[in-house]
Image (spheres, grey):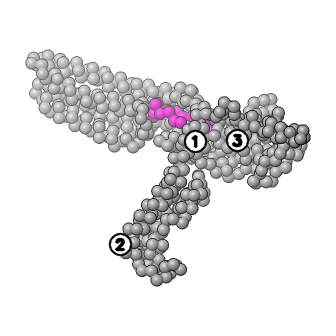
Amino acid sequence: MADMKRKLSSVSAPRGKPVKLEVLRTDLVNIMAVEQVRQVYLAKVFVQLSIRNGQADDDLMADFDDQEPKYRHPRPGAMWFLHSIEFLNSLSVIFTERKVTQMGKKDLHLVLRAEGTFMQRYHLQAFPFDTQLIQLGVVSKQANEGVAPLKFITKGPDCKPKLNLPTAFALADEWELGNSLHLEEELYAPTADRTYPVICFEACLRRKPAFYLLNICVPMSIFGFISFSQYALRLEEHVADRLNFSLVTVLTAAAYKLATGQLVPHVSYVTSLDIYVLSSIATVSIHTMTGPSCHLIENSGDQRTCDLICGGLNFFFFLLINVWLLRMRIRDAVTTVWEAASTHGSRTSSVEMADDARSKRESYELELVEEAVSSQMDNGAAQARLSRGTPSAGLARQSRVDRPNSSTYESGPKRLPRASQDIISRGVPTGADLNPEAAGRPAGDAGKNSKPLGDDDARRSRTEQQMFRDIAMRC
């Protein structure tokens, strides 16, 4: 009985010394997309860790070549520790490589390659002169208070991690990438009695504002400058013409703002670009009110004086907002990327990072299910058109919808839940299933003597498709 108690206590009690993983190298291989509306980015990552004198530990070498390692009592192997590492802010991730190699005669190296979609809070108050932090949290699923903890080592006399950025940046036309990658150690504490080790890698991106300045700010400033030409007309003689000119300029500026609304991020707070555009429209709108207001004065000389004073004040306001925009552009040009990040960028803690990813992951999975179901629907409609003898439209549609299917199910960023895969695979009928005789094949064992579908059958099939879509969405 005493031996059994000692054995049970040794299983439940945490080990005194955690396995130390030294960070040797981290490469942000590529940043493929930055989506401000969805608050995500797509990237490829490489992480290399080391266990000093790991080859001398028989427990760590036990599952050296095991691709599906299991926990071994009393001490798991190195491959098991490698599989316990995940990304804290990932929405969907694919591990393209996970291996343990022997380095020299003593050390073990743990190699991790992954690509996926990661959650990131973007702060766009200074848009288009904003700078964003790209954070990636690497966390161990084994708690520090558990039976098999591990510890990340990032600082020390023999630990000098290499942090590398991509040599060819895919988004170089839109963003400027900082010249360094920063590394921080944190503790993720989801509860009061459980903590997990986290290493957070940070890269910095600064937006190149030339596109927004040329396509939005410059036209709006031209509209504001043209509006001052109405003061060439004497108020007492051409008040109707001036009012007509002002209204046309206001409508032109408002229509241009609506036309360029798709070029700016859809956020609920006011950005720097919104301040400039709204101020330019306000400048043009003031002209519409000053002319009729000054015309109410009976004395013509006083009318002219009032008109010039109002025009001068409005012109001063116009110059003020353009000088403010120019000042922001100069300040953005003379500061480095990381200096700008300290001003505009806001760092996200590990707890916030995990909470954001957890809440976003649920809606992200539902989006994937809906896209998969809709692609199956489109594929069935394309096959039905082919069976009816419209090859040109059907082939064009089929070539378009066949490509996303492979990336959605096989090599996509996220596998669908198994229940949703089963529903989609067997529940959505294709065009050939709806009309097998028109597709040039037998109808099957259960439908050898079946007739072509009528209007009621086609309507019932559409109802079943909608039912399967609703079931998949709930899964």
Label 3 packing within 10 angstroms: few (<14), some (14-19), many (20+): many
Q: Amino acid at mark 1?
A: Arg
Camera-side residue of 438 and 362: 362
**Image: 331 above or below 134:** above
Residue in the foreground of this view, choosing between 104 and 385: 385
Residue at figure coordinates x 41%, y 31% from the top left: 270
Residue wearing tag 2: 455
Mark sitting on residue 141: 3
| In front of the other: 36 or 75 | 75
According to the picture, the residue beneath numbered tag 1 turns out to be: 358
Q: Is residue 374 left or right of residue 320?
A: right
Can you tell which quarter of the image residue 143 is in? top right
| Residue type marked 2 | Asp
**CA gap, disc 3 to disc 2?**
56 Å
> Percent position (x, y) of residue 276?
37, 30
The residue at the point 33 percent across, 28 percent down is 279
Q: Residue at image x 58%, y 55%?
A: 417
Earlier sequence position, callout 3 versus callout 2: 3
How far apart are the two marked residues, 3 and 1, measured between alpha carbons? 15 Å
Disc 2 and disc 1: Cα gap in Å? 45 Å
Which element type, helix, strand or loop, lies under badge 3?
A: loop
User: Which residues, given as a range, are shown in magenta?
Assistant: 121-136
Q: Quadrant of residue 86?
A: top right
**Residue 142, image x, y percentages:** 73, 40
Quadrant where the image shows the N terminus? top right
Estimate the x, y position of residue 201 in percent, counting from the top left. 65, 36
Say if 231 sits above or below 84 in the image. above
Identify whether 271 is placed above or below 92: above
Q: SS at mark 1?
A: helix
**Residue drawn 22% across the image and 18% down it:** 309
Q: Are marks 2 and 1 in contact (CB under 8 Å)?
A: no
